[in-house]
Image: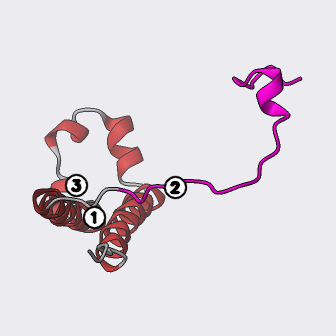
Amino acid sequence: MNAFSDLPDDAREAPLHGPVLVMPPPKPTRAQIWMQRIWLVVFVLFCLEVGIVLMVGPWTRAWTDNSLSTSFPAIHEFLMNGFVRGAVSGIGLLDFWIGISRAISYRETVS
Protein backbone atom coordinates (compact mmCIF):
# COMPACT_ATOMS: atom_id res chain seq x y z
CA MET A 1 0.00 0.00 0.00
CA ASN A 2 1.27 3.44 -0.93
CA ALA A 3 0.37 6.48 1.13
CA PHE A 4 0.60 8.71 -1.94
CA SER A 5 -1.89 6.80 -4.07
CA ASP A 6 -5.36 8.24 -4.59
CA LEU A 7 -6.79 5.01 -5.99
CA PRO A 8 -8.75 2.53 -3.92
CA ASP A 9 -7.18 -0.87 -3.28
CA ASP A 10 -9.19 -2.74 -5.91
CA ALA A 11 -8.44 -0.16 -8.66
CA ARG A 12 -4.69 -0.39 -8.10
CA GLU A 13 -4.76 -4.11 -8.66
CA ALA A 14 -6.82 -3.91 -11.86
CA PRO A 15 -5.00 -5.14 -14.96
CA LEU A 16 -3.87 -2.44 -17.36
CA HIS A 17 -4.86 -3.82 -20.75
CA GLY A 18 -7.09 -2.65 -23.51
CA PRO A 19 -7.24 0.60 -25.47
CA VAL A 20 -6.34 3.87 -23.83
CA LEU A 21 -8.03 7.02 -25.04
CA VAL A 22 -5.56 9.87 -25.37
CA MET A 23 -6.84 13.18 -26.66
CA PRO A 24 -4.47 15.43 -28.58
CA PRO A 25 -3.78 18.83 -27.07
CA PRO A 26 -6.02 21.59 -28.38
CA LYS A 27 -4.63 23.62 -31.25
CA PRO A 28 -3.63 27.13 -30.22
CA THR A 29 -5.69 29.92 -31.66
CA ARG A 30 -4.23 32.53 -33.95
CA ALA A 31 -4.27 35.08 -31.14
CA GLN A 32 -2.37 32.72 -28.83
CA ILE A 33 0.29 32.14 -31.47
CA TRP A 34 0.77 35.87 -32.02
CA MET A 35 0.91 36.53 -28.28
CA GLN A 36 3.60 33.87 -27.99
CA ARG A 37 5.58 35.49 -30.81
CA ILE A 38 5.26 38.98 -29.32
CA TRP A 39 6.29 37.70 -25.88
CA LEU A 40 9.34 36.04 -27.46
CA VAL A 41 10.39 39.27 -29.21
CA VAL A 42 9.96 41.31 -26.02
CA PHE A 43 11.89 38.76 -23.95
CA VAL A 44 14.75 38.51 -26.46
CA LEU A 45 15.07 42.29 -26.79
CA PHE A 46 15.03 42.68 -23.00
CA CYS A 47 17.74 40.04 -22.58
CA LEU A 48 19.90 41.60 -25.29
CA GLU A 49 19.56 45.09 -23.85
CA VAL A 50 20.29 44.08 -20.26
CA GLY A 51 23.15 41.89 -21.45
CA ILE A 52 24.80 44.70 -23.39
CA VAL A 53 24.41 47.14 -20.50
CA LEU A 54 25.93 44.67 -18.05
CA MET A 55 28.78 43.74 -20.40
CA VAL A 56 29.79 47.31 -21.21
CA GLY A 57 28.67 49.15 -18.07
CA PRO A 58 31.50 48.22 -15.68
CA TRP A 59 34.11 49.55 -18.12
CA THR A 60 32.55 52.98 -18.67
CA ARG A 61 33.05 56.28 -16.90
CA ALA A 62 29.55 56.06 -15.39
CA TRP A 63 30.77 53.07 -13.37
CA THR A 64 33.98 54.70 -12.14
CA ASP A 65 32.77 58.26 -11.49
CA ASN A 66 29.46 57.35 -9.89
CA SER A 67 28.48 59.83 -7.15
CA LEU A 68 26.68 57.12 -5.21
CA SER A 69 29.69 54.81 -5.03
CA THR A 70 32.24 57.62 -4.47
CA SER A 71 30.38 58.73 -1.34
CA PHE A 72 31.01 55.28 0.15
CA PRO A 73 34.73 54.48 -0.20
CA ALA A 74 34.45 50.79 0.74
CA ILE A 75 31.75 50.17 -1.88
CA HIS A 76 33.68 52.21 -4.44
CA GLU A 77 36.82 50.17 -3.85
CA PHE A 78 34.83 46.93 -4.16
CA LEU A 79 33.20 48.04 -7.43
CA MET A 80 36.57 49.07 -8.90
CA ASN A 81 37.96 45.57 -8.36
CA GLY A 82 38.68 43.89 -11.69
CA PHE A 83 37.08 40.63 -10.53
CA VAL A 84 33.79 42.39 -9.75
CA ARG A 85 33.81 44.18 -13.09
CA GLY A 86 34.52 40.91 -14.88
CA ALA A 87 31.81 39.09 -12.94
CA VAL A 88 29.22 41.71 -13.86
CA SER A 89 30.34 41.55 -17.50
CA GLY A 90 30.11 37.76 -17.36
CA ILE A 91 26.54 37.95 -16.08
CA GLY A 92 25.80 40.31 -18.97
CA LEU A 93 27.32 37.86 -21.44
CA LEU A 94 25.22 35.07 -19.96
CA ASP A 95 22.06 37.17 -20.23
CA PHE A 96 22.93 38.07 -23.83
CA TRP A 97 23.43 34.37 -24.63
CA ILE A 98 20.08 33.45 -23.04
CA GLY A 99 18.29 35.90 -25.33
CA ILE A 100 20.03 34.65 -28.45
CA SER A 101 19.54 30.98 -27.61
CA ARG A 102 15.85 31.53 -26.90
CA ALA A 103 15.44 33.24 -30.27
CA ILE A 104 17.31 30.47 -32.11
CA SER A 105 15.50 27.59 -30.41
CA TYR A 106 11.97 28.96 -30.93
CA ARG A 107 9.71 26.49 -32.71
CA GLU A 108 6.06 26.74 -33.56
CA THR A 109 3.74 23.80 -33.78
CA VAL A 110 2.58 23.07 -37.30
CA SER A 111 -1.21 22.99 -37.48
The answer to whether residue 91 is above or below residue 14 is below
Which residue occupies the extreme front position in the image?
A: 18
Q: Is residue 64 left or right of residue 16?
A: left
* Crowd around label 3: few <14 · some 14–19 · many ≥20 (10 Å): some
Q: Is residue 87 left or right of residue 57?
A: right
The residue labelled by disc 1 is 51
Residue 85 placement: quadrant: bottom left
Q: Residue at x 69, y 23 (%)?
A: 6
Q: Amino acid at mark 3?
A: Trp
The answer to whether residue 103 is above or below residue 76 is below
**For the residues carrying marks 3 and 2, which lies nearer the camera in this image?**
2
* Residue 63 image label: 3
Residue 67 placement: quadrant: top left
* Crowd around label 2: few <14 · some 14–19 · many ≥20 (10 Å): few
Q: Amino acid at mark 1?
A: Gly
Indicate the secondary structure of the residue bearing disc 3. Answer: helix
Q: Are marks 1 and 2 in contact (CB under 8 Å)?
A: no
* Crowd around label 1: few <14 · some 14–19 · many ≥20 (10 Å): many
Q: Residue at x 32, y 43 (%)?
A: 76
The answer to whether residue 13 is above or below residue 82 is above
- Dominant SS in magenta: loop
Extent of the magenta region: 1-25
Q: Position of residue 75 (x, y in %)?
A: 35, 38
Q: Position of residue 56 (x, y in %)?
A: 24, 68
Between disc 3 and disc 2, whose residue precedes? Answer: 2
Q: Amino acid at mark 2?
A: Val
Residue 71 placement: quadrant: top left
The answer to which of 110 and 49 lies nearer the viewer is 110
Q: Are marks 3 and 1 in contact (CB under 8 Å)?
A: no
Q: Residue at x 40, y 60 (%)?
A: 91
The residue labelled by disc 2 is 22
